[in-house]
Image (cartoon, rainbow, N blue to C red):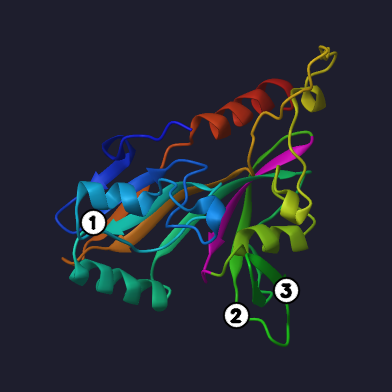
Amino acid sequence: MKYPHFKDLILFENQDYIVVNKPPFVASLDERGASGAGEVNILRLAKQYIADAQICHRLDKETSGAMVIAKNPEAYRSLSIQFEKRRVNKTYHAIVDGQFQFDNLLVDLPILNEGNKNVTIDRAEGKRAETYFNSLKYYKHYTLVECKPITGRMHQIRIHLATQRAAICGDSMYRGKPVYLSNIKRGYKLTDEEEQPIMKRFALHARRIVFKGLDGNDIEIEAPYPKDFATLLKLLDKFDA
C-alpha cells in the first residue's frame, strides 16, 4: 500500500492543532498484534511532522475523515477535557443498505466492550452510548445518513445503525453487504472476472468536527469525501436515484 504524505492530509493547522483527513485503511495508532506491527499509522506520520504530536481521538482503520492531532501537551489536555465533557461536536456520514427515514432519531442503547474489537449492546453491563441519526438522501435501495455521536464508544455508530436494521454498506461485522455495480445498474453484464465491490470497506466517513481552540474560539472543519466514498455516491446518483 502506498502511504500519503502527511502534509497532503492536513485540512487545518494552527500553533496548537492539526486536523487531517484520515485516509481509509490507515490505522490511527500502532495496532496490537503481529499483523499491525510496523505498519505506518497517523500517529507515526504526525510525529515525523512534529515530534510532540498526540492523537486526540481515534477512528477505525477503515473509517476516513476528520481527525484532530494536538501539537503540544496543553492543547491535548484541553481537547481531552472537551471530549470528556461531550463538548466536541462530531458528524459522520454513512451509506446504509435500505431506505430509512431517520428524523433526529436518538439511539441510546448501552455498549459493552468485550475486548478484541468486539462490542455488544448490553443494557445491564454496557456503558452509556447515544447517537442521533438523520436521513440526508434517499436512493431506491440505499440511504445516506448523518450520524451525530454524543458519546464515543468503540463501533458506536456501526452497532447503533445495525440495531435499526440499517447496517452500513460493506460492514460485514454488522451484516452490512458491499455494493456492487450489478446491484444498481440494470442490464449490467458480468465478465468472467469476479466482480469487485464499489467500495472495499464499510461506507463511513467522519465528515465534520467542531471544538474550541485554546483561545476559546470554535474550530470547525469539514473533511471532503475520499475517492471511494464519492464514487459510490456518484454511482448511486446515476443508477439508483
How far apart in space, not on screen, are marks 3 and 2 (Cα)? 10 Å
Identity of the residue drawn at 17% across and 52% down: 14
Where is residue 27 drawn, in percent x and y?
47, 51
Instruction: Look at label 2 and name its amino acid.
Output: Arg
List the residue tagged with mark 3.
Answer: 121
* Disc 2 packing (10 Å; few <14; some 14–19; many ≥20): some
Q: Report the span colored magenta.
A: 141-152
Identity of the residue drawn at 33% across and 39% down: 9
Instruction: Look at label 3 and name its amino acid.
Output: Ile
How far apart in space, not on screen, are marks 1 and 3 (Cα)? 34 Å
List the residue tagged with mark 1.
Answer: 17
Label 2 element class: loop
How far apart in space, not on screen, are marks 1 and 2 (Cα)? 29 Å
* Disc 3 packing (10 Å; few <14; some 14–19; many ≥20): some
Identity of the residue drawn at 60% across and 80% down: 128
Identity of the residue drawn at 18% across and 67% down: 214
Label 3 element class: strand
Q: Earlier in the sequence, mark 1 or mark 3?
A: 1
Q: Is residue 199 left or right of residue 84?
A: right
Instruction: Look at label 1 and name its amino acid.
Output: Tyr
Q: Earlier in the sequence, mark 3 or mark 2?
A: 3
Q: Are marks 3 and 2 in contact (CB under 8 Å)?
A: no
Label 1 element class: strand
The answer to which quarter of the image holds residue 121 is bottom right
Q: Is residue 143 left or right of residue 79?
A: right
List the residue tagged with mark 2.
Answer: 128
Q: Nearer the viewer, residue 114 or 78?
A: 114
